[in-house]
Image (cartoon, grey):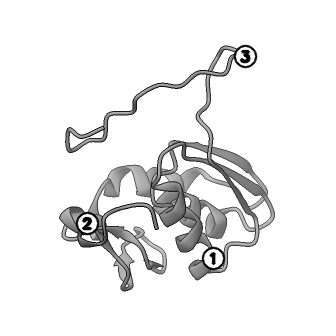
Amino acid sequence: MLLRHDRVVTKPILINIPGRRSIELINYYKQFENDYPDAESETKRFFVDTIEKDWNIVDAGANIGQYATSFSRLSPHGYIFAFEPTSTYEMLVNNLKYAGCKNVEAFKIALSNEDVKKRDKIVRIWGQI
């Protein structure tokens, strides 16, 4: 993994999905360990109530894969395209493999409305590049 070991956890954590079985992730950022289980519960509820079993979904900025993993379960006959341009991509891939997500393809690129190659700094939410 490209990230500093003291910032990345490699033990399973349960992520609560309203009205559904929890998902389990193997890689995540230590500083958010207490936030992950119940984070964005209203958004997760919306997806549970809305997504159909055969939808194709784009997860732009897939991060560690908690939504891509959930989408994989909610739309088992669909396909999920997960995009994560940062080094977090490695954790995303590890989590997708750990969860057995066969209908998710991960890409280590950013999405844009322009057809260009561009290098850009991405500021992480904890203020570091």
**Are the residues flagged by discs 2 and 3 in contact, CB closer than 8 Å?**
no
Q: Which residue is mark 2?
A: 7
Res. 13 image quadrant: bottom left
Near-viewer residue (76 or 116): 116
Q: Quadrant of the C terminus?
A: top left
Q: Residues within 10 Å of mark 1 (few under 14, many from 20)?
A: some
Q: Is residue 121 above or below residue 56?
A: above
| Label 1 secondary element | helix
Q: Which residue is mark 1?
A: 97
Q: Gap in Å between the C-alphas at discs 3 and 1? A: 30 Å
Q: Residue at x 51, y 61 (%)?
A: 65
Q: Residue at x 81, y 64 (%)?
A: 77
Q: Is residue 80 above or below residue 61?
A: below
Q: Position of residue 102 (x, y in %)?
A: 75, 72
The amino acid marked with disc number 2 is: Arg
Q: How many marks?
A: 3
The amino acid marked with disc number 3 is: Asp
Q: Is residue 43 above or below residue 6?
A: above
Q: Position of residue 112 (x, y in %)?
A: 61, 22
Left or right of 62 in this view: 41: left
Res. 29 image quadrant: bottom left
Q: Position of residue 79 (x, y in %)?
A: 77, 56
Q: Gap in Å between the C-alphas at discs 2 and 3? A: 34 Å
Q: Which residue is mark 3?
A: 115
Q: Position of residue 18 (x, y in %)?
A: 40, 68
| Label 3 secondary element | loop
Q: Earlier in the sequence, mark 2 or mark 3?
A: 2
The amino acid marked with disc number 1 is: Lys
